Amino acid sequence: MLEMADIFREYGPSYCEKYGSRMLPSHKRAMDDIVNCRTPALGGQVYECPDCHETDYSYHSCMNRHCPKCMNDQAEEWRKKQRKLLLPVPYFLLTFPLPAELRQPARSHQKTFYDLAFKASAEAMQKLACDPKYIGGDIGFMGVLHTWRRDLGYHPHVHYLAPAGGISEDRSKWLPCKNNFFLPVKALSKIFRAKFRDALKATNPKLYNQVPSQVWHKDWVVHCKPAGKGKEVLKYLAPYVFRVALSNRRLVKLENGQVTFRYKHSKSNLPAQAGKWRTMTLPVFEFIRRFLQHVLPRGFKKVRHYGFLSSKHKQTLALLKYILGTVELDPDEESTQEQPKHVCPKCGKEMLFVGTIPRTDRAPPLPVTV
């Protein structure tokens, strides 16, 4: 099966020789980690079957958040932790995309634009939520940055998951949304645009002057839709939080310097084609470029909590759970799970741990052009 690591091993060095002087350190590190993931370079454990004496080597994961191999287990653990934040109410999913005119400067100044996208969108939601016409209280919500389209195109936007209501100013009662309606998207769009504009101007006036002025006069688009409640919310969101731009199972082939991968069509103006799998073939350097543009700056926090869901408002969340009633965990999730046994691939017997593989020097780093 073709993996991203195979593509980087074969074409990563020549890609870095050509573009290394323009690559971000986080891009080079991601390539290096993906190449070394679950190989002897990272060390591991040795197991032996007591019956047939089959030997098996289990190598460590790189744990890079952009590695296609490392995210599934983390997603499940995150989902279990987030269940403690759930309230027994409906939820809404809101999406705040940056307009097309801001994509190029956002790609070149990722941390600035991503931080401001969070800041402006969160403030827009909090501003409207305080209005008695809508909720009239403080809300809580969780935001997740997402930067890719299904074809690996660049499309930065922030998703928010929010309980359908808020807490009153005196902290005495829950204020539910009315008629399955959360916040007006047209008003959110205007406030989001204004707050982003003002924040960019204050944060980086030089960068602000490079943005075409018409972007501040066009309509920005915000989406809001019901997202169920409880377990189904986190089941939907957990893979989304830890998903990388492209999983290994979507890779089809690497042939003659071109990569073919699968993606789902999602054009809203072609409902008959929406959700159907298609294939796309790109020159390998263009494929690598598209993948790497979704590697986040080192240390950037892509999941953020606001309002009564933030860590500094744990007491408010506890109070809301008391007002609304707590969400009970499933018995199977409350119990301590046994560690999975290491099973012999030949006879199926449980294998025994016999030793540790020391971490060696990592594979030679990808070259950097000075």
Image (cartoon, rainbow, N blue to C red):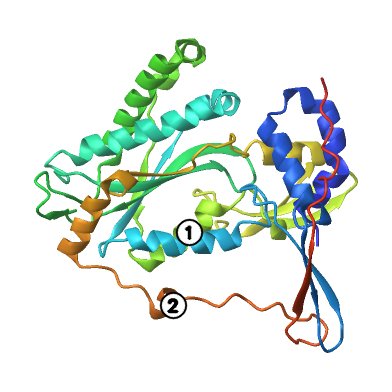
Residue 73 shows in the view? yes
Residue 64 image position (x, y, % from top left):
65, 48
Residue 125 position in % (x across, y down): 28, 39
Of tags 2 and 1, the one toward the viewer is: 2
Label 2 element class: loop
364 and 48: which is toward the camera:
48
Task: Please indicate, yes or no, whether residue 217 appears anywhere in the rendered image.
Answer: no
Q: Is residue 148 left or right of residue 199?
A: right
Locate the N terminus by quadrant.
bottom right
In the image, residue 363 sits, relative to residue 233, either above or below, namely above
Q: Which residue is mark 2?
A: 335
Q: Which residue is drawn at the image coordinates 79% and 27% (left, top)?
A: 19
**Residue 361 in the figure: left or right of residue 101:** right
Amino acid type of disc 1? Trp
Q: Residue shown at 84%/45% (left/top)?
A: 363
- Residue 233 percent across, percent down from the top left: 39, 61
The tag earlier along the polypeptide, 2 or 1, is: 1
Residue that appears at 31% across and 29% down: 190
Q: Which residue is mark 1?
A: 78
Front residue of 4/211: it is: 4
Q: Is residue 333 above or below residue 251?
A: below
Q: Position of residue 257 (x, y in %)?
A: 87, 43
